[in-house]
Image: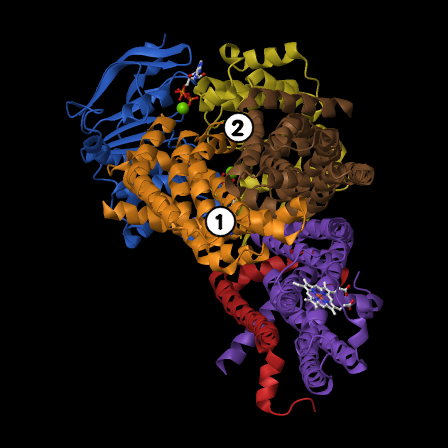
Chain colours: A brown, B orange, C yellow, D blue, E red, F purple
Amino acid sequence: MLSTFLAVLRRDLLLAWRGRADVLVTLAFFVIVVCLFPFGVGAEPNQLRAIAPGVLWVAALLACLLSLHRLFAQDHADGTLEQLLLSSEPAALWVAAKVLAFWLSTGLPVVAVAPGLALLLDLEQGALPVLVLSLALGTPILGLLGAVGAALTLGLRGGGMLLALLVLPLFVPVLIFGAGAVEAEASGTGAAAHLLLLGGGLAGALALAPWACAAALRISTD
Amino acid sequence: MLSTFLAVLRRDLLLAWRGRADVLVTLAFFVIVVCLFPFGVGAEPNQLRAIAPGVLWVAALLACLLSLHRLFAQDHADGTLEQLLLSSEPAALWVAAKVLAFWLSTGLPVVAVAPGLALLLDLEQGALPVLVLSLALGTPILGLLGAVGAALTLGLRGGGMLLALLVLPLFVPVLIFGAGAVEAEASGTGAAAHLLLLGGGLAGALALAPWACAAALRISTD
Amino acid sequence: MLEVDDLACLKGDRLLFRGLAFRLQAGELLRVAGPNGVGKTSLLRLVTGLALAEAGEVRWQGCPIRRDREAFHRELLYLGHAPSINDLLSPLENLRFACAAAGDGSDEEACTQALVRIGLANQLDLPARVLSQGQRRRVGLARLFLSARRALWVLDEPFTALDVKAVADLAQALSDHCAGGGMVMLTTHQDAPFAVAPRVLDVGAYAC
Amino acid sequence: MLEVDDLACLKGDRLLFRGLAFRLQAGELLRVAGPNGVGKTSLLRLVTGLALAEAGEVRWQGCPIRRDREAFHRELLYLGHAPSINDLLSPLENLRFACAAAGDGSDEEACTQALVRIGLANQLDLPARVLSQGQRRRVGLARLFLSARRALWVLDEPFTALDVKAVADLAQALSDHCAGGGMVMLTTHQDAPFAVAPRVLDVGAYAC
Amino acid sequence: MQWESWSAFWNMGGAAYFVWGSYGVTFALMALELVLVLRRRKDTITRLLRWRRAVGKDSARGSAKEGGTPVPAMESET
Amino acid sequence: MNSPERSRSLFRFAAPHNFYPLAGRLAPWFATAALVLTVAGLWLGFFVAPTDATQGEVYRVIFIHVPAAWMSMFVYLVMAFWSAVGLVMNTRLSFIMSQALAPTGAMFCFVALWTGALWGKPTWGAYWVWDARLTSQLLLLFLYFGFIALTRAIEDPRRADRAGAIIALVGAVNVPIIYFSVQWWNTLHQGASVSLNKAPSMATTMLLGMLVMAIAAWMYTIAVVLWRARSMILERERHTEWVGAVLEREAQGGRA
Ligand code: HEM
Ligand SMILES: Nc1ncnc2c1ncn2[C@@H]1O[C@H](COP(=O)(O)OP(=O)(O)OP(=O)(O)O)[C@@H](O)[C@H]1O
Ligand SMILES: Nc1ncnc2c1ncn2[C@@H]1O[C@H](COP(=O)(O)OP(=O)(O)OP(=O)(O)O)[C@@H](O)[C@H]1O
Ligand SMILES: [Mg+2]
Ligand SMILES: [Mg+2]
């Protein structure tokens, strides 16, 4: 049981380390999208401050979204997925390991650099801890929900974009509560309710998504 | 000469048609990114109107960017690219054909739906023609520049993201002039200068990018 | 014992074969034969449970594999067309992961031994990306040496890309597995020097 | 005539071979032999000009290929490991595109004939994605029947995944090409019934 | 009746664009959907007929026997 | 297995070859009902219902707007229901039903958005505002598109069935979440600047017209879905004898 979980986790982290260009570049994407905004929108500080939580969260969401397709793609192409499905352990187990590794290598760095970018956009300093917390709770949900979408679109032509279409409506509540939390804190309303809801969502996703994802994988490799 | 150009163009358009899910979904991505913003930023109409040109242009840029990696990826993986490089025609020729097909199947639809989305964000109606024109001039530049990046990152692990990192700095001027044109028109300043610059950029990119791209492809398949 | 009854396989509009049935007893080596496109790969995927049959049933030790998938998969080793090798990992890392994920031990020493035995002693630490076709194939096949306890080996074109000596070694290993009471089911278009001539199942005979 | 002089190939920090030299005359069939990983594929890629040699030179009709690439490529047909087939297109569309892009004619009738001749009469309009391994391989090989005017054929493991009959047909076609004054350079680990036993170039002899 | 004249009716109290725009698009879409659905049936039938001739009735029928179905009532015919 | 009790029970219509002729017989009746009810509803809406005191004539959009909005939400639920049935009972007809429903649901969803937008311009001064209800309707449209795109992108029908069912169910779990989150988001940001005003002017004739149109939309949906399901059944069951017989009959009919 646990040995499969650990084997998959260790391998995926090793792969992330070998391909650290990837991880760095996900980060770079996050940074660049945020930095693009002043160019597109104009550099007026008040306006930037007002849209900062939204821009940060949208950028984090896009960064997660765009790395999602490689959650299973490589393993699907080279046959590793078939082998994993032929293992006698429950599939939800190693799916969870894969998602965990994915979050550690993609979500965590985004969470880590977000405060820096927030300062660039002149977000109020008091809201920084809430920003980090909301991202830390929200990005795993994105990863879990996204894994289901990634499993369903596996091997389909145009899969990456189809994936975006499938999961974005599901991501909207996360985005609303995530960005909402930061904004509420920045405007002094207090973010506790938002964060609680995000926590609840995370618990629910943790309980359900691996199973849905495992079922989807079986369907996709048929 | 021309027959190779036409053969490649026809095939790529045929492929786009076979995989029309792809094209539709690129569009859907554009639509969704634009629609995400109100969730992140808040639904206040004045604020939305102010950031509309920037958001639209950033979304169009991201949509182009994210489809770029499939410009050569498939042909690289299955060996078609090798065969094309072994053809005795100049490579810049069929590279141009590929980029043209790419723009017709990705950029053009984005240009076509942009006005509708602009209405969602409540952009001033008078600025719509300028929006369309700026996108029609700008997205081909994105495609041409992006093709060079796509060729350079071919077959590299994390290519998609590395690509983003490489080409985004090149895209920024296009973004500035594109979004600037719309903003200038909306604020009554007149967009002629911006549009002229975009046109000049397009002419330059058309003249140079195919050659650079061909050279990059030779390097990448070595 | 593996029993296959009345199997039919539908691909798109085409019924590849129907009424396909056979038994595979301990110690037997079955070669699935037939021209290109007759449905050999499809048959192997049905037998392993990776694909769903249009009709018919596959039973392992008397029990339909859909019913007790875990028990069947514990006894099964399947190596398909795709080598299931990650390009960034070295042969050793690939092999250790494959074994660990399948639930076999992934002892470093044993894995190294297997790789050396299959002729990759000099490539243990190269990333798989730079290996030659034949070397990639060998990485996948190295699992055979660590899976003796799995009774049923299902191999899709295992001899592809291997050089003459490697083909002979592999044929020997397969014969040994059968001699030890295992079962092997494979497809190949090449001749290989098996110790005992394998039984042949001609899929063409069931084609529609 | 193809002349190769003093060729050396470096991969990573490993010198695969050096001092490799041979001549290929019109009408000759050259089989590049050697165990897995010795550098056969690497050699073919050097000869076609797709990769850059560490040392040495390849000349076509007396002229270094780097100097007049177009003229060389007009006479060359290379089929590598990758089948250069797009999964969404049918065999016919794939073949027509391959011919058109290479600058050969892409006459529909001729392409259909070639595919029928290679045994894909029933798969003309299927998307290539659903073809079996052997069928995919055949789509790539069909170009041979349309490239008789190209003097030099360079083929990397052309027999892989083909069934016995297809191997015989292909060997026949290669022999015919040579009989008509063409040249063929190929790698393979399989035996094939060539009309005339091919000349063998053992890369192992130049290995370091 | 609500309307003094047909022109008043078509004018919709100045909101003709909005009201008729709504109704027009709605009914156009419904009509389009109906046409597509009916045409799909025709297409399906011609395509399947062509297919049956191509593969030969034999193999088409052959699979019917194998055509195992999870719905029990399915096999009752014949 | 072929016990007579079972084939006499209602359950036997779960078999495609029993459902196919039944659907063919029923669909025209539903279509006729839809036509009659639409005419009646339009007559009620345009000639009986009075002009609205505050909005004038624009409000007459309500007779398609509200039925379309209701249908779009309900159809998604029905779709999810059939998907669940399909996954649990493994009946092919359920998957066919859910896939046959999707385009019609998406169509109504779009109609609700379109008519709402056209209604919004004269009443709110903008084609679109990011109101909670409008936004969740938009997201519903995306859910429909996702379902349709996914099932179309997968060629193997069995895989398409089950993959579509999963996404339909995941979406159904999310619909209420989306609805409430969006509501909260909106009220947090801009208060109740926009609310649909209805109660005061809602005359009984209006209500009646709306109800008649809603039932007409139901009838239309059922008819179209039955027809669409018939084509899908033929496609899926093309290997069976009964489809062969149907096709032969059609071929003869075509020639005659
Ligand atoms: C794009 C814009 C719009 C969309 C997407 C939209 C969506 C909806 C939806 C989903 C419903 C059903 C809600 C329910 O029954 O709980 C609905 C009902 C309704 N809408 Fe709209 N709407 C839009 C614009 C408008 C406008 C501009 C008005 C009028 C000023 C309006 C008036 C109504 C009324 C009166 C109802 C019936 C309310 C009820 O039965 O509770 N809508 N709309
Ligand atoms: N959608 C489809 N429509 C028609 N035929 C199909 C479809 N999908 C697959 N096929 C056919 O099914 C067969 C698949 O065969 P499979 O891959 O099992 O062959 P194989 O016996 O392993 O061949 P090989 O020796 O070449 O590996 C091929 O003939 C292919 O053309
Ligand atoms: N970066 C590297 N470092 C060390 N060795 C390398 C590197 N890249 C490639 N090689 C070695 O170079 C050889 C490549 O050989 P090539 O693919 O030409 O073999 P081949 O003769 O075609 O073999 P096969 O019969 O298996 O196809 C392999 O032995 C591989 O291990
Ligand atoms: Mg096969
Ligand atoms: Mg090789």
Tell which subunit mark 1 falls on. B
Q: Is residue D95 visible?
A: no
Quadrant housing residue F210: bottom right
Q: Which residue is mark 1?
A: B183
**x and y percentages locating residue E4 in the rendered image:** 64, 92
Is B118 displayed left or right of F219 in the figure?
A: left
Tell which subunit mark 2 falls on. C
Is disc 1 in contact with disc 2, using a CB cutoff of under 8 Å? no
Q: Which residue is mark 2?
A: C158
Are there few (<14), some (14-19), or many (20+) residues within 10 Å of tag 2? Answer: many
Quadrant housing residue B147: top left
Q: Is F103 situated above or below F186?
A: below
Are there few (<14), some (14-19), or many (20+) residues within 10 Å of tag 1? Answer: many
Front residue of D94 and A106: A106
Q: Which mark is residue B154?
A: none
Disc 1 and disc 2: Cα gap in Å?
63 Å
Q: Amino acid at mark 2?
A: Pro
In the displayed image of the protein, which residue is found farthest to the right? F5
Front residue of D121 and B29: B29
Q: Nearer the viewer, mark 1 or mark 2?
A: 1
Q: Is residue D200 visible?
A: yes
Quadrant housing residue E75: bottom right
Q: Amino acid at mark 1?
A: Glu
Secondary structure under tag 2 reads loop
Placement of the N terminus of chain F among the 4 image quadrants: bottom right
**x and y percentages locating residue F253 in the rendered image:** 54, 80
Q: Is D54 situated above or below E59?
A: above
Q: Residue at x 58, y 32 (%)?
A: A30
Please check whether the numbered discs 1 and 2 fall on a single chain. no
Q: Residue at x 45, y 37 (%)?
A: B172
Is B129 displayed left or right of B219 in the figure?
A: right
Secondary structure under tag 1 reads helix
